[in-house]
Image: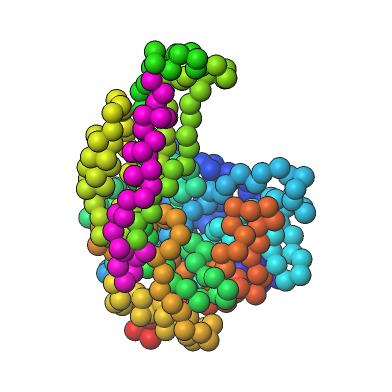
């Protein structure tokens, strides 16, 4: 059994459902300490974070990821225990196999091999791990970045092990992500009997045109890196449970995934302008999960491309698709950020898996990226 596979299985056995870490970071920290990393635990609330650094000189290459996983769902739907990893038909099955304990294992093995070959390497290597990526993402990477900024530690390059590949390992590099803005809208009407609508005000009837206008609004055209901004209603809630009552309140939850063409404040103003045209009273609250970020082609993307060509034998594409990632907290401090990891075919699903052969290949890929960034080749 390869070292990467062995470590991936050990991590999967730890049932670190968000925000729990269950010893994953301690397991990794022990191995990094043996390599000369200065290891620092950064807990915030119930969230465990790890910052480990080897070296004091720039450039600083940070390997980032999360040890928490989403709940497995009903155990009986899994072919085997989701936290008892099994190998079947060339695949490693278990919760977190692809998202993202397989990549974390590959990162650790890559660094062990790199340091063994280059113990006096220039520059610095760091690990930034959190148990709060799959959850609210409040006390995780964002808090660690705040601490690093206050003490003047600057990340030059960040490699995040999110599952970015589509059909073959390395066929896609994520070099940016859309922003995410959620609105919590309450439409106020007047409750009454359905037989006497003139004495009531149905909040849905009053606001349906405004909601339709929000759904049909063209927010932007996107650009060469991002698709057009998407507005989606995620939840509608009204009613008293009785079929003869006009409810007095409608709650609407919606989300926009927006590109670098828009700013959150502009989006808010445009939404309120549409709502203000309607004949109803409303309240609205906002949650900004992250702003869009984009890493332009430079040293990190070129090093990653070259490593993929060498290790995987393919030419990768660049992508900004998918949901949010913790890259949204790292990029704003000026770091170049890419996400490169295993095939995204089963994450958050029953019987999540990663191809066994991908694990060692991914470790070699991370090692070659480090060599190109720190050694120049």
Quadrant assignment for the C terminus: bottom left
Q: Residue at x 42, y 34 (%)?
A: 252
Measured along the vertical axis of the image, is residue 238 above or below residue 89?
A: above
Q: Position of residue 8 (x, y in %)?
A: 62, 61
Judged left or right of residue 97, residue 49 is: left
Residue nearest the observer in this picture, 281 or 115: 281
Q: Quadrant of residue 347?
A: bottom right
Measured along the vertical axis of the image, is residue 196 above or below residue 140?
A: above
Judged left or right of residue 56, residue 73 is: right
Measured along the vertical axis of the image, is residue 191 above or below residue 56?
A: above
Colour mapping used in the image = rainbow
209 drawn magenta: yes
Residue nearest the observer in this picture, 64 or 257: 257
Q: Position of residue 92 (x, y in %)?
A: 69, 64
Quadrant assignment for the N terminus: bottom right
- Which segment did they paint magenta? 201-227
Q: Residue at x 43, y 63 (%)?
A: 321
304 drawn magenta: no
Residue nearest the observer in this picture, 160 or 226: 226
Q: Quadrant of residue 285?
A: top left
Residue nearest the observer in this picture, 255 or 247: 247
Q: Position of residue 251 (x, y in %)?
A: 42, 29
Q: Residue at x 72, y 71 (%)?
A: 90
């Amino acid at each position: 059994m390869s070292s990467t596979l062995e470590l991936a299985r050990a991590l999967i056995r730890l049932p670190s459902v968000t925000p729990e870490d269950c010893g994953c970071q301690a397991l990794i920290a022990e191995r990094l300490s043996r390599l000369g990393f200065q290891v620092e635990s950064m807990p915030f609330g119930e969230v465990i974070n790890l910052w480990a650094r080897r070296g004091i000189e720039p450039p600083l290459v940070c390997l980032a990821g999360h040890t928490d996983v989403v709940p497995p769902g009903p155990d009986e739907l899994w072919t085997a225990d989701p936290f008892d990893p099994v190998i079947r038909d060339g695949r490693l099955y278990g919760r977190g196999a692809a998202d993202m304990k397989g990549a974390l294992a590959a990162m650790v093995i890559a660094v062990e091999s790199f340091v063994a070959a280059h113990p006096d390497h220039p520059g610095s290597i760091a690990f930034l791990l959190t148990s709060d990526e799959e959850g609210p993402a409040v006390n995780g990477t964002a808090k660690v970045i705040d601490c690093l900024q206050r003490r003047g530690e600057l990340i030059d390059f960040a490699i995040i092990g999110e599952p970015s590949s589509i059909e073959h390992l390395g066929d896609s590099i994520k070099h940016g992500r859309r922003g995410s803005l959620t609105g919590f809208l309450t439409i106020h009407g007047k409750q009454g009997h359905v037989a006497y609508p003139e004495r009531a005000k149905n909040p849905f009837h009053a606001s349906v045109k405004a909601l339709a206008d929000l759904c049909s609004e063209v927010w932007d055209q996107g650009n060469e890196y991002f698709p057009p901004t998407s507005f989606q209603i995620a939840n509608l809630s009204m009613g008293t449970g009785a079929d003869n009552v006009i409810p007095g309140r409608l709650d609407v939850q919606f989300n926009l995934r927006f590109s670098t063409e828009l700013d959150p404040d502009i989006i808010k103003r445009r939404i309120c302008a549409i709502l203000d045209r309607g004949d109803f009273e409303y309240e609205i609250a906002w949650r900004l999960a992250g702003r869009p970020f984009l890493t332009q082609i430079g040293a990190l993307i070129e090093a990653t491309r070259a490593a993929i060509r060498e290790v995987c034998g393919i030419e990768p594409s660049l992508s900004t698709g998918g949901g949010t990632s913790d890259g949204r907290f790292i990029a704003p401090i000026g770091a170049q950020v890419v996400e490169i990891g295993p095939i995204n075919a089963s994450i958050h699903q029953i019987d999540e898996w990663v191809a066994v052969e991908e694990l060692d290949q991914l470790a070699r890929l991370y090692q070659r990226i480090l060599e190109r960034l720190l050694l120049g080749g």
